[in-house]
Structures are given as C-alpha cells and as structure tokens.
Amino acid sequence: MSQTPIPPASQLLNDIAGNGKLLDAVMAKLGLKNDAALARTLEVAPPVISKIRHGRLAVGATILIRMHEVTDIAIRELKAIALPAAPEVAV
C-alpha cells in the first residue's frame, strides 16, 4: 500500500479554502454553530479563528493538536482535510 507524501507544513495549512474546510469539519464534528463557539472549545481568542478563516494566519501546531484533542480526529486526517484538492493526472 503506497501512501501519498504530505507536503511540508509551510505549504500544507496555509490555504484559505483548506483551512475553512478544516474549521468547518471540526465545527461539524463537535456540533458547534459558529466560530465563537469553536474558539471557546479550542481555547483560543475569537480573532484567531477569524484570521485563520480569512487567510491571515496559518493553522499552527498548537491549534492542530488542540483540534485533535477535542475531536479525536487523527492529526493526519486533519491535515488531509486542509489539503487543497490535488489535480487528477492522467497516466
């Protein structure tokens, strides 16, 4: 079984659309209604969530670990959610 290599963290969690998907997935898993509730659950200030959602702040290791702790979603899966979709390559 071959696994696709994961890009370096600097490329991985700095995508606006991917980070939005990640935040939305965590909110859905926890049954949260808005970013303020997510910020309280992750124990970060609400502007941190806003900055991540609007691409002014990348998802850092601390927040990624906290997401793992509160959702029980593996960090590898959280990273996969945040990855931009790779284009299909014809062989």
Image (cartoon, helix red, strand yellow):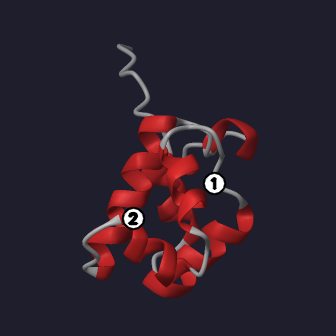
| Residue drawn where x is 48% and y is 47% of the image | 53
Whole-percent x, y for residue 24 in the image: 33, 59
Q: Is 69 positioned to the left or the right of 58 in the image? A: left
Task: Tell me which amino acid carries mark 2.
Answer: Asp
Q: Is 5 positioned to the left or the right of 32 in the image? A: right
| Residue drawn where x is 56% and y is 37% of the image | 55
Along the viewing direction, whichever of 18 and 43 lies nearer the viewer: 43
Whole-percent x, y for residue 31 in the image: 25, 79
Does any portion of residue 3 appear in the rendered image? no
Q: Which residue is mark 1?
A: 59
**What element does badge 2 sit on?**
helix
| Position above or below: 46 against 56 | below
Disc 1 or 2, which lies upstream in sequence?
A: 2
| Position above or below: 50 against 29 | above
**What element does badge 1 sit on?**
loop
Q: Is 34 positioned to the left or the right of 83 in the image? A: left
Whole-percent x, y for residue 69 in the image: 56, 85
Q: Which residue is mark 2?
A: 35
